[in-house]
Amino acid sequence: PNPSHFEKEIDDVLTNVKRLVEGATSPNQRTTQAAEFLYFQSRVLRKLQPESYRIADDYFQQIKGLNNSSPWTAAATLEIAKIFENAEAKVKSDDQVFRGMMIGVYEFLSELPQPTKSANEEIVSHKLAQLYVADDRLVEAEELVRGAKQNSLWLPIRANLAEKKKNLRRSASLWQELEEQSSVGTTIWLEARLKRILVLYQFDKPNATELLTRTIALNPHMPPTFATRFERLVDRWGIR
C-alpha cells in the first residue's frame, strides 16, 4: 500500500476509536467496541506492515487508555506484541526506546486478568524476563525466573541473568546444562556452546580457547552463520 494512504488510514482508525467510545450507550460497551475495533485494525496492520512498531505503539496507547478487560483487549495487545516481535530482529539491540515500548506491551499483557492471558502466560513471562535482562532490570527478571517452570526454555535467561550478576561460573554451568539437553550440532546446541565459551573466556581463558578450537574441529559441517561466529572468535583471540 501507498505509505501516505496508510498514514491516513491510521488517522481514521484513531478517529473511529474516539467515536466508538463517545457513541455507545454504556461505558463497558463503549470500551469493548473500541477494543474489538482495535483488534481488527492491529491484525490488518500486522498483515500489511508487519514491522511497523511505532504505529503499533500508537494503537497500544489507545488500548491502554480504554481501561477495558474484555478478551478483545488481550487479542489486540497480542497482535501488537507480534508486530514488535517482527521488528525486533531489525532494530539495534541497544535501542532502549524500542525495548521500553516492547516492555510496556508485555507488562500490560502480564497484568491482564484471568482467563484472558492464561494460554499465553508463560510465553509472556518468558519474553518479559528476556527484556528485563537486556534492560538491566535484574530484580524484576529474577522475580519472573523464580516463578518459572524448571525447563530448558528458561535456561538461556537464567544463564544471561547469572552473567549480568557477575556469577560467571554459574552462567557457564547453565549454558553447559543446555548443551547437555540438546542434540550435538543443532542450532540450540551451537548457540549454547558459543555462549559458554564467551562466558568461560572471562575467567578461564585457556579452557575457553581449547573448547573453541575443539568445537570447530569436531563440527566441520556446522551452518555457515555459526562457522563465521566461531571463526571470528579465533581471529579476535589470536588463536591461530
Image: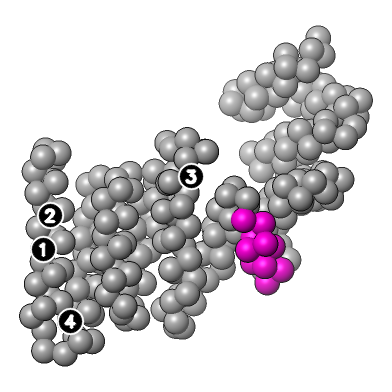
The image quarter in which residue 51 lies: top left
Residue furthest to the top in view is: 240
Q: Residue at x 63, y 63 (%)?
A: 140
The answer for how far apart the CA atoms under marks 2 and 1 are is 6 Å
Which quadrant does the C terminus fall into?
Answer: top right
Q: Amino acid at mark 3?
A: Gln
Q: Residue at x 63, y 50 (%)?
A: 136
Judged by its main secondary structure, the magenta piece is: helix
Camera-near label (3 vs 4) is: 3
Q: Amino acid at mark 2?
A: Asp
Q: Residue at x 44, y 60 (%)?
A: 104
Nearest to N terminus: mark 1 or mark 3: 1
- In this figure, which residue is indicated by the disc labeled 4? 30
- In this figure, which residue is indicated by the disc labeled 1? 15
- In this figure, which residue is indicated by the disc labeled 2? 11
The answer for how far apart the CA atoms under marks 3 and 4 are is 34 Å
Q: Which residues are magenta?
A: 137-147
The image quarter in which residue 224 lies: top right
Indicate the secondary structure of the residue bearing disc 2. helix
Q: Residues within 10 Å of mark 3 (few under 14, many from 20)?
A: few
Indicate the secondary structure of the residue bearing disc 3. helix
Residue furthest to the bottom in view is: 26
Q: Is residue 221 left or right of residue 18?
A: right
- In this figure, which residue is indicated by the disc labeled 3? 96
Indicate the secondary structure of the residue bearing disc 4. helix
